[in-house]
Amino acid sequence: MSAAAQSSGSRTLVASIAGGLARHFRVQILPEGESTWRLFATYKNAEVATVCAQRLAAEGITSRVVSVRPLLPFGTWPAKPLPSSWRA
């Protein structure tokens, strides 16, 4: 996963990943005195993740929201169409 570092919950970072994970939003916290972000919560909805980050910020906890999505739009990988027997 790659993303630019951000120390505020006011904006959403975007990270791209390979594979079949559904898009989701991670709330990460940066514990005082540490340099590594830690996963706090995961949400399907950006607004809910943002509210969580805002509540953490109100408590003085450094947080950020990371939007995690596949590298390619759904259905574009593999490049060749799947055999009809694989389709639902």
Image (tube, helix red, strand yellow):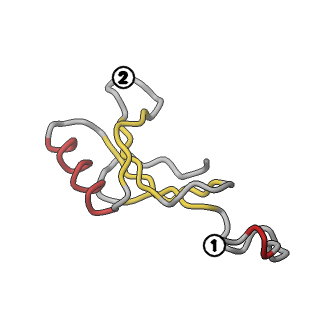
Q: Which residue is mark 2?
A: 33
Which percent across, then down, holds residue 82? 80, 72
Asked if the residue at tag 1 contacts the one at tag 2, i.e. Cβ–Cβ closer than 8 Å, the answer is: no
Q: Amino acid at mark 1?
A: Pro
Residue 55's x, y, as percent? 17, 46
Say which of 4 and 40 sits in front: 40
- Point 51% across, 56% down: residue: 68
Label 1 residue SS: loop
- In front: label 2 or label 1: 1
Q: At 55% across and 60% down in the image, what residue appears?
A: 69
Image check: 17 left or right of 76? left
Furthest-front residue in this view: 85
Q: Where residue 88 appears, x then y in whole percent?
A: 65, 71
The Cα atoms of the two marked residues, 2 and 1, are separated by 38 Å
Front one among 35 and 86 = 86
Q: In which quarter of the view is residue 84 placed?
A: bottom right
Relative to residue 70, is residue 59 depicted above or below? above
CA neighbours of label 2 inside 10 A, class few (<14), some (14 to 19), many (20+): few
Q: Which residue is the site of mark 1? A: 73
Identify the image quadrant of residue 39: top left
What's the amino acid at mark 2? Answer: Gly
56 over 20 or under it: above or below: above
* Place of residue 53 in the rendered image (x, y in percent of width and height, measured from the top left): 26, 48
Which residue of the protein is positioned furthest toward the top in this rendering? 33
At 26% from the left edge and 57% from the top edge, which residue is drawn?
A: 48
Count the numbered circles shown: 2
Q: Judging from the image, what secondary structure is the residue with disc 2 in?
A: loop
